[in-house]
Structure formats: C-alpha cells, structure tokens
Amino acid sequence: MGQTLSALENEMDVLGHKPYRARQILDWIHKKRVADYDGMSDLPASLRAHLMEKFPPGALEVVRTSGSGDTTRKFLFRLPDRQLIESVFIPASPALYGETSDRRTLCVSSQVGCAYGCKFCASGLRGWKRNLTAGEITAQVFHAEKITGERVDNIVFMGMGEPLANFENLSSALEILNAPWGFEIGARHITVSTSGLAPQIRRLAEHPVPVRLAISLHGATDDVRGQIMPVNKKYPLADLFDACEYFSSRRKQKLGLEYILIAGVNDSPEQARLLAKHARRLNAKVNLIPYNTVEGLPWKRPSETRQQNFVRTVRAGGVVATIRREKGHDIDAACGQLRLRAEDEQAPTS
Ligand code: SF4
C-alpha cells in the first residue's frame, strides 16, 4: 500500500520480476481490497516473499471506532511506531458547501499532530510528531472501507495535520487515490484543506490531479486571524489570497473558505461583511462551522441568533454560505480529541 504504479514497476525491475506484476499487485489492493500477500493467489511465491520483506504489511491497526450505522463514525488507528491518528467517515451526507450528495466521505489525517498551532484546534495541542507516508494516508481509506463495508467516494484532507506541509507524501497519495489502478476517486471528489501555506498552494495548482482546495480562513482580517492562527504571520491574507487567485486561475472548481465561528473572536458583523468581500474576490463558497468546545481550550460557540445573523450578512454580500451542522468531522475542533484521550489512556503503559 502506498506505492504508485511507476514506483512499483521500478521495484519489480529491481527485484527481478516482470513489470506487469505491479499492476497485478495494485489490482489486488485497490480493486479486490486484499492487502494480505498470501491472498494474492496469482503471484509467484518468490514475489510474495519479496513483497513481505520489502513492504511489510500491517501499517495501521484499528484501535477504536465510535459511532455506528448511518451516523458519522470516527476511527482511531495505531501506526507501527505506536503513534495514533484519526479518520472520520461521514455516510451519504450533505457534502461540503451545502451541495446535496449521496457520497460517502472520509476525512483523513496527513500528519501525526500538527506544527501550526491554531489556537482552537485539538490536533495542534501537543505539537507535530511526524509526517504520514503515502501508504499511511491511503490505508485510512482501505481500512474505513473494510470496517464500514462501504466504498468511500469522497475524500477530504481535513483531519489531523497540515497536508500541504507533507507535500511529497500528499502528492503520491493523491495519485493513488485518483488513478484508475488505485482507488479511482474523481479529483473533484478530493478536497485538500490548508491553513494557508501560500507557496504550497501554488505548487498544488500544478499537481496533475486537479483536486479541490479549501482554505481554513477563520478570520477576515490579519488582526483577527492572527490571534487564532499563528500561520497568518508568515502568510498574511494578502499573500494567501494571491496564491488562491493563482490556484483558481489554474482550476475550474470553486474554492471553499472554511470559517469556524468562535464567540467574541471572529463572529462580528464586520467580520461577516469582510468575509463576504473576500469570498466574492476569490469566487469562493463559504462554509461556517459553529465551534465545538475542546477540553482545555477557552473558546465558545456563538449563540444560535449570532450564528444566523452572521450567515445572513455573508449571504447578503452575494456569497453562497452554509452552516455545517453536527456531522461531526474534521476541521471542527473536535478533530484530534479522540487521539489525545487515547494517548492519555495509553501513557502509563507505554
Ligand atoms: S486547524 Fe489544521 S493546521 Fe491548524 S493546528 Fe489544527 S490541524 Fe493544524
């Protein structure tokens, strides 16, 4: 898992096997959803032994699942080095930005922890540990499908970590998720969300897989955004918006602006008016997420009236805006909490 076709063909060459074996292996993993080499019955025993040695299986171990049936489900996975990551499965749901959809979405993590330290986010609370490999990113999809028995056909990189800070592995993962020999998920059903790494946004604009882009904005002025997102000092709004405009010029899809509503921080009418102005300039849709309380953090969700006033003001500015209700996942600050709790539980024994 985690190999692109061209990389695996090279490996076959190095290991002294025919290149077509690479397609056979990927077919087992991605079409037949078999990751166990012993189950790949049409491969010679010598190749299976080589694979076992070169790419030992068992990248992810399922530690816990929460939620069931047709509700949002969270999965906690343990990596071979005992680090923990989360993914969230959202069954047929109103997709992002209010577009109705019967897509089955998986919100995936791209790093263990996060270095960006957004003040409202559980994922950043204990800092960054390491990048996930492409195999660890795509294995989340493989295991989510195994657990739920459903085919994932929409991916959002809104779980733990800043995907654009792990660009090389993200890049391979996007190829594997999208390719006909991979998971075959359409590029417009893959969304990469970033806290605003302007240079990498430009890089993503050149990626051969034309994915969607969502920006975690959370503040409509440098002042307000800077209070809760330290990354804004390095890439202030002017730089970020220039990069976004470049991205849009290379892609057909609309950008998404994510905006967590936090009481008394970024929920004023003035912020709403400016948010609408930015969204108009970027031709973007706005997704508002009422803040979910995180243990140990001081922030609160605004009242229902204040939320409604905010969305009305944004819409009055001529912008498509939705409020995302408790579908549970991702960039709502609940992401990362499952891992923090599990780390605390496992601390005395590890
Ligand atoms: S919101 Fe995203 S970028 Fe910010 S700390 Fe959390 S995971 Fe990192």
Image: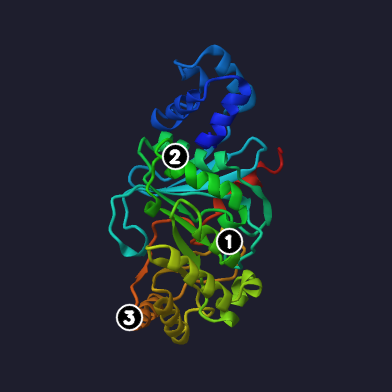
Who's the residue at 64% across and 44% down the image?
345
Give the position of the C terminus as an image quadrant: top right
Please state the horizontal and vertical placement of residue 67, each as a whole percent of the image. 41, 46
Dot 3 amino acid type: Gly
Give how far apart the Cα atoms at labels 2 and 3 are. Answer: 38 Å
Who's the residue at 35% across and 38% down the image?
150
Q: Is tag 2's residue or tag 3's residue first in the polypeptide sequence?
A: 2
Give how far apart the Cα atoms at labels 2 and 1 are. Answer: 28 Å
Give the residue number, with chain letter if any, for mark 3: 318
| Residue 52 horizontal side relative to residue 272, left or right | right
Dot 2 amino acid type: Ala
Relative to 14, say whether 143 is above or below.
below
Dot 1 amino acid type: Gln
Give the residue number, with chain letter if any, for mark 2: 144
| Residue 127 horizontal side relative to residue 222, left or right | right
Q: Are marks 3 and 1 in contact (CB under 8 Å)?
A: no
Label 3 SS: loop
Label 1 SS: helix
Q: Is mark 2 within 8 Å of ligand 1?
A: no
Label 2 SS: helix
Q: Nearer the viewer, residue 316 or 7?
A: 7
Give the residue number, with chain letter if any, for mark 1: 200
Of tags 3 and 1, the one toward the viewer is 1
